[in-house]
Amino acid sequence: MHSEFELITRFFTPDPPGAEAGVTLGVGDDCTLLAPTPGQRLAVSVDTSVAGIHFPEDAPAMAVGHRALAVSLSDLAAMGARARWCLMSLTLPAADDDAWLADFARGFHELCDATGTALVGGDVTRGTLSIGVTVMGEVPPEQALTRSGARPGDLLAVTGWLGGGAGGLTLWQRGERDTGHPLLRRYLHPLPRLEAGLALRGLASAAIDISDGLLADLGHVLEASGVGAELMSDTLPLAEGLVAALGEEGARQAGLHGGDDYELLLGLPPEHLDEARARLAALDLPLTVIGRVSDQPGVQGVAVTGVRGWQHFPGEGAP
């Protein structure tokens, strides 16, 4: 059984990132000291992942570590921010499973390395398995992508593919354990679209990451921007293997309502479409137009009655 400090030292104290990473004091003190790039705005977000709610209790430890960081980094991607640092608060039921801890730490650290994100502090405590991750990034002044910039006439477009997260969860619940299956890969190891967010600066009028489902997250953009939308549901780019797993209608519903995709949903002036597609093509990432922003409230083109997307506390009257 590790003590709290032994656990942190063994599994969650990376090599000192150094001044080039903007870290003047890292893990091991009461606070970390960071040096943001002069002239940049700091973008900060936090997410909590709880066993049995956000991921299966029997999910592979590497996937749990990867997902916990990925879902927070996805928020930076939606803002067009470059990832810089993260903090992690880990709650464990016990601290004696070295193999699980090593795999969890590996999944977390590998995504840190892949995205240029430095782990600079955190906390470990005892309780039901949960992971809270705070991410910090940078974006130039006036270049942040927000939810409130969509205007009538803008196109609505999505990066990548939809429905894979919901499809992967469905397969896991059916007993599928082949982590090489394309749907399980998308569910267990989602990829935050950080490079796409950077590429879309100056082009997109609004953006959000699709974490709670396309229609639910579209609703946040429409509310923040004071606009409506006309969707073309037959143009949804569905994830590989989704129709085979769920059938055509099930796949369509997963694309519209399923969460855990972590693609970007964009408002995009039509004159920027070609340039946006060219920039994302350089990243081997498709951009699909799925509708248009309108001045009529609500969403036209699909039935949305009773659809709320994922909510922890749906409130009175929720379906």
Image: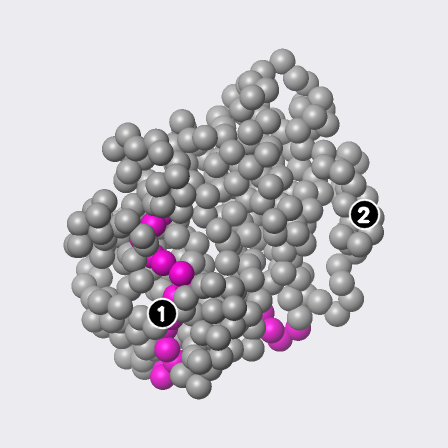
What amino acid is found at the position of numbered circle 2 in the picture? Answer: Gly
Q: Tell me if 93 is positioned left or right of 237 in this view.
A: right
Q: Is residue 29 above or below residue 2?
A: below
Seen at 40% across and 83% down, the residue is 270
What's the CA distance linking mark 1 and mark 2?
40 Å
Q: x and y percent of residue 8 in the render?
A: 69, 28
Secondary structure category for the residue under label 1: strand
Q: Main secondary structure of the magenta part?
A: loop
Q: Is residue 153 magenta?
A: yes
Element type at marker 2?
loop
Q: Is residue 94 visible?
A: yes
Residue shown at the point (79%, 36%) measured from the top left: 29
In the image, is residue 169 above or below residue 304? above
The quadrant holding residue 286 is bottom left
Residue type at mark 1? Answer: Thr
Give the class, few, some or many, for how many residues have Cα within 10 Å of label 1's Cα (few <14, many ≥20). many
Contact between marks 1 and 2 (CB within 8 A): the answer is no
Judge from the rendering whether residue 318 lies leftward or rightward of residue 279; answer left or right.
Answer: left
On whether residue 202 falls in the magenta region, the answer is no
For residue 17, above or below residue 204: above
Q: Which of the two residues, 58 or 46, is positioned nearer the viewer here?
A: 58
Query: What are the residue bounds of the magenta stretch?
Result: 141-165
Instruction: Measuring from the top left, give residue 167's x and y in whole percent.
Output: 29, 45
Which labelled disc corresponds to residue 115?
A: none
Kindly identify which residue carries mark 2: 18
Residue at image x 76%, y 63%?
A: 37
